[in-house]
Amino acid sequence: MGGVNLSANQVDVRTIPLGNSYQYALTSALPAYPVQLPDGSYFNGIANGINNTISIGTNPVFYRNNYSNLTATFRSTNTAYLQLKPVSGLTIRSELGYDYQRAKSDVLLNQQLYPKGIVGAERTGNGRATDQSVTNQTTNVNTIITYARTLRKNHQFTLLAGNSVQSTLSDNGTYITENVPEGAKTGTDTARTVVFKDQLSFRFVSFFGRLNYAYRDKYLAEFSVRTDGSSRFGPGKRWASFPSASVGWVISDEEFVKSIPAISFLKLRASYGLTGNAEIGNYSWQKVFTYVGYNAAIYGGSQGGQFTSLGNRDLSWEATRQFNAGLDVGLLGNRISATIDFYDKVSDGLLLDYALGPLAGTINNVITINLGSVRNRGIEISLNTRNVETKSFKWESSFNVSRNRNTVLSTYNAPFLNFPFQFINGPNLATPGLPLGTYYLAQFAGFDPQTGNELFYERDRSVFANTGQTVRTGNLWDGTVSNQAGNNQFIQPNRTPYPLFFGGFTNTFRFGPIDLSALIYFQYGNWIYDQGERAQSYPAQGQMQRRNIPGIGNVQNAIRESDNTALNRLVWTSNARSFESTRFLHNGSFARLKNVQLGYTLPVETARKIRLRTLRVYASAQNLLTFTKYPGWDPEVFRNGGGDGANATLGPGVTNNDLPQVRTLLIGLNFGF
Amino acid sequence: MTYFITTKHLLSGLILGLALGLAGCENYLDEVASKTLIQAENVRTVQELDILMTGAYSGIARNIAFGGNALIIGETFADLVAINNTAYRTAPGRSSRVYTWTHREEDYGFQAEFLQWSTFGLTNANNVLEILRVNQVQTPGETNPRLDITRQRGRLEGDARFVRALCVFEQTRLLAYPWGHTPDNSHPGPIAAFQSPSTFGDLAYPRLSVRAAYDSVLNDLRRAEQLLPENYDPARHLPDYQPRANKYAALALMARVYAQQDNVDSCLAVCNRLLGTGSGYRFPGVASRFPGTAV
């Protein structure tokens, strides 16, 4: 038996450069500025007057009219398989997959947007065309052999063995040309065209096996092991094995439980196993140098090379060992069902980029290392109930809640360090004994009653140098006058970006043909650092103010009432505007009506009369209501769609005027013929 | 019976395939290619070593790297090379990614800039020496002397030792108390490493003493003097070598190092070697120039 599945599609997207333009309305493109001047020319804002640079924020309309970005994406996904069943119970299946993706983008900044002599021009300016092409090809070959057999009626065995080979080849090239004539797509100044052209590849090879055993479907056991190899690690470090085992007991199949009619299903399960992670960049383990298009290494007219990274031959897989125990319960004919899960997982040898400082003699100054360990321990509970079940009315509820406790167990330590290394990423840090991403900020101590200046606590430097603990000296420093935040940051215990618990509650009602469902999402105990609020709490050039500012309150009221105490706290270009402090750290707990949907389904007979198989009309709304004490725009923080690297792990609670969750109202009609 | 054999064959084939697959995997996972990145362990040609050496010189040749000490390049190379960095100040982004991303001139100053660039010279020089030490580059049957490693090996090693000596010497002058600050010169010297780190643990190398630093600099320069050619010869050298150090550059730097140690006799001796026997420009001995002084 075999099969082939081929697909191909192409999408052309013309992008308007409005990514964060609404943010610029708060800074360099203030709403008070005109779009065009009376003579028809575009108002370019204040930035253009300084150094002939043009950014999107200067005037989004001007930018849009002189910019084009066309991206053509082609993707073809192809799979084929061959399956043999040579003897009863034995299945051999081979799968071949080939995924081809090509994205070509042409970005054009015309002569108005990118004039002659612009700062930062590669060459002459006068228009700039960037043509980028990225091609990714991934090939997968999987072979799986399964053998299932039942011995003496009650003993079921399933044996699985297989391997998987994955190879990804990525080609990318960027060509920049300048001096682009009107209407052209590329420039005539091609003296420096190849900016970056590279071909990267990585490969994974895996072997895996699994043995399942079931006795009368009542006692279940599984043992599996997989060995993975990755080209991202050096010789001797490429391969790692990850075994796991699990057991299950369907208690409800036991005679002594069968006699209890209320219990319809009861299962106890436990598992322990290892998993691996190799999600790092290619070449991280190797000493590699670059020379193509790298101007900094030209000497005496010859192109030289310099090392991008010194590599790390010890680099290997990050491993997570996880224990899991769970209980599945079904009561009253499964009208009530619940699942409780407890997990304890420890990730060791976390793959992290360690900044080496500028004296490593490499371009990137980063070494990727297996460093430190983190524990996540938690419990997840879900409960589903069918509350009412009659012919004309049905009501179902679903509730789930999760609690996760995260602790950094270790980071880098060495004899020459007084305390284990503290990873700091923006206002967040990772240090042993505390949760990942614990906030680390200058500690706001209120305002000076005389001057209105902002005061901050001073940190004891010798205690910090010896122990890493942040202890107050009893002195204060004036942040309005000077920025001393670098030596006076405090660890904020129990202030992390992660909630103490979170969950959802869904209710679904059906009255005959009408259905109604609502989902409430909630989270509690997470903290948000609002960088946007910080920027907008200090008067400065080209900077909008928020109406409500922490420590000042409603600014309009303060002006109207000539409240000098409040107004004294607004200091023009205060030094405090350039560092992060606890003044802008807020509890981000919230509950939100994420989704409501009301629908009407036409009875089948009626639909048939109008020659339709089904017909459904519905209205749905997202994010209708939010209950929170968080003063910012939106407590559901998604920083520009999520950061990467340390930003994603340590700083998910940092927001900087990010686009709030959109409130959507949707009316829809589904019909089937 | 036939059915049984088929299954057996099939399974044997699969097991054999799996075993062969396993054996080939290590190599399969080796094959990572890139058009713009060269892995140090894949360096196989003289040209690639010269790319690294050019990178080493480019690191140390920036005028910003040496601040006021950039003159040393002039001292040692005479008029062999002109450093064109006029655009560097006005558009740093064009000259250096590192500069733009990690440094701001006003924060660090020339000295820190030099420190940073000296590490580029050191990293490349150390790697060239390590590649040569394990005989990684082999060019059997190469008839072009400019690409034959057996003919270029000495020159490349001399180049690398010269750059390393220059970097370590300048780092020492920048970071350490001067020669003679302690009677045995055991006070802390440069942060330079004499091997290219391969693991995180390698980064914890001890800081050299000033004595060890000067010893290593002089040792590198003595070897460089022996190994470097007298001049660039297009028949024997790739054009890349043209603006680099020759044996006289090594001698000039050696004289400078002795001068820094207040070792006037050795300084004069090296200067005289540099100027050549019988040269009219020989320096007189200190004793004859300043009779009555004991140096």
Image: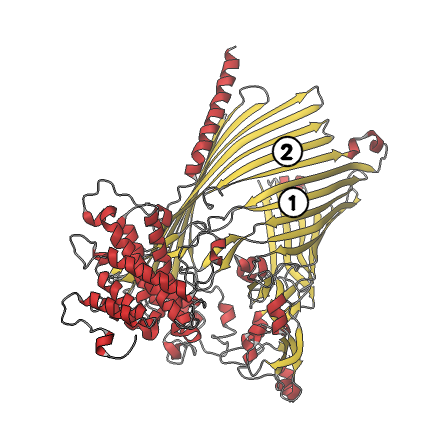
Indicate the chain on which mark 2 is placed.
A
Residue at image point 71% right, 39% down: A270
Residue at image point 53% right, 82% down: A573
Residue A525 lies, with reference to residue A273, above or below; the image says below
* Residue in front for this viewpoint, A515 or A371: A371
Query: At which x and y percent is residue A225?
Result: 59, 35
Q: Which residue is mark 2?
A: A223
Residue B21 lies, with reference to residue A571, above or below; the image says above
Residue at image point 66% right, 72% down: A471
Query: At which x and y percent is residue A191?
Result: 25, 61
- Residue type pointed to by label 1: Gln
* Residue in front for this viewpoint, A646 or B278: B278
SS under mark 1: strand
- Residue type pointed to by label 2: Phe
Residue at image point 61% right, 42% down: A274
Indicate the chain on which mark 1 is placed.
A
Q: Which residue is mark 1?
A: A322
Q: Most extreme residue toward the front, as rendered?
A: B292
Query: At which x and y percent is residue A500?
Result: 70, 58
Asked whether residue A103 appears in the rendered view, the answer is yes
Residue density around tag 2, few if under 14, some if 14–19, many if 20 or more, within 10 Å? some
SS under mark 2: strand
Residue density around tag 1, few if under 14, some if 14–19, many if 20 or more, within 10 Å? some
Q: How many marks?
A: 2
User: Marks 2 and 1, Cα distance to the nearest angstrom?
Assistant: 15 Å
N-term mark: 2 or 1 = 2
